[in-house]
Amino acid sequence: MQNNQLVLYGWLDDVTQSNTSSAQLIGKVYIGTLDEAGAAKVAREFAADILKIFGATSLLGTKIYFVSSRTGHKEIWSMDYDGSNQKEFTAYGTITTFPVVSPDGTKLAFTTYPVRKGAGGKVIGEGQPEIYVHSVETGRKLVYYNQKASMNAASDFMLDSRHLLIYCTASGYSQIYETDLDGSGLRRVTHSGSLEVEGKVNPKTGNDVVFVSGRGGTPQIYRMNIDGTDVARLTTGEGDAVNPSWSPDGQHIAFSWTRGFEPGNFNIFVMDVATRDFVQLTHGAGRNENPSWAPDGVHLVFSSTRDRNTQIYTMLADGTGVQQLTTQGNNEKPVWSKATQ
């Protein structure tokens, strides 16, 4: 404790070196406030510097956005990677859901059901689902033009953070489209006679997309080129497979699947897209859905009903190290954002 601050002297030495002068890898002072938050801050910063030495990616500064019902309405919330600092991001007083974050971490798109009001401003119900885009930095709503359709839903950002993949019923049934950041420049990507949803762009290449389609009868995960060509099914056709999420290396996807379990009981799987080999990460612990990769490619965040209510958990990408992050209300549909610069 110095000058009303918490001071941590962080040292890291390489014990294989022959003398102390060449052994020092880190010798740094970290400063925080005299409380629990300050202690967490200096510990995280020291840990992040150690991780850099070993070439690993720190989760310091990353955010998890998720949907929570704790205020009585479904709103978008944010929290730090370890579940701390939980804050309400939207306050629309209706159903707000399916958040997606731009690759640069500066914009958040989501789907909301605007409140419909009658005479005297009385709330008379919820409108058709629309896409809203907000600045993460200011929290302010940005302009986005929604198509005239019974449903418009945000799906993913393109790698430039200035275009969106959406799924929309403008053609009469849900198909995947690309739009500019303001909703203009609509371009249809899929052209099937089945429902097409949840398009996710490969974060490494930007040239291929995984998505969920019912073209085979039940929801399954498919891959296609960004222009809608070269469509191939990735999952086996068993059960229902939904919620695909690309790993940062663009080689694996995490997803939810009912394969091998009673209908409706989803579990988290990870698949190597090239070989289509898959591994099951959760086993018989409630309904596990909406996995999202951490920027380090080592952790996943997901929702689960293993504690009766739906809560958000993290785990390592091999299914170990499960940690519960939320406890209040029901919490779902998490997405992990990288740290903004």
Image (tube, rainbow, N blue to C red):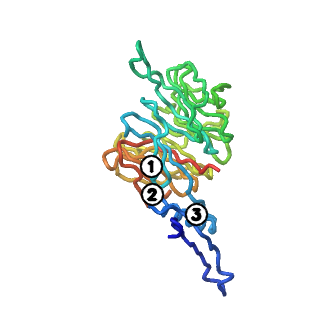
Q: Position of residue 18 (x, y in %)?
A: 66, 87
In this orientation, does residue 127 appear? yes
Q: CA distance from mark 1 to mark 2?
A: 9 Å
- In primary-sequence order, the first of circles 3 and 1 is 3
Q: Are the residues at dot 1 and dot 2 in contact (C-beta closer than 8 Å)?
A: yes
Q: Amino acid at mark 1?
A: Ile
Q: Is residue 64 left or right of residue 283?
A: right
The secondary element bearing badge 2 is classed as loop
Q: Which residue is denoted by mark 3 in the rendering?
A: 48
Q: CA distance from mark 2 to mark 3?
A: 23 Å
Q: Which residue is denoted by mark 2 in the rendering?
A: 319
Residue at 60% from the left image edge and 60% from the top image edge: 57
In this orientation, does residue 274 appear? no
- In primary-sequence order, the first of circles 1 and 2 is 1
Q: Are the residues at dot 2 and dot 3 in contact (C-beta closer than 8 Å)?
A: no
Which callout, 3 or 1, points to the residue nearer the camera? Answer: 3
Residue at 36% from the left image edge and 44% from the top image edge: 310
Q: Amino acid at mark 3?
A: Ala
Q: CA distance from mark 3 to mark 1?
A: 28 Å
Q: Which residue is denoted by mark 1 in the rendering?
A: 268
The secondary element bearing badge 1 is classed as strand
Label count reads 3
Q: Position of residue 249 (x, y in %)?
A: 62, 53
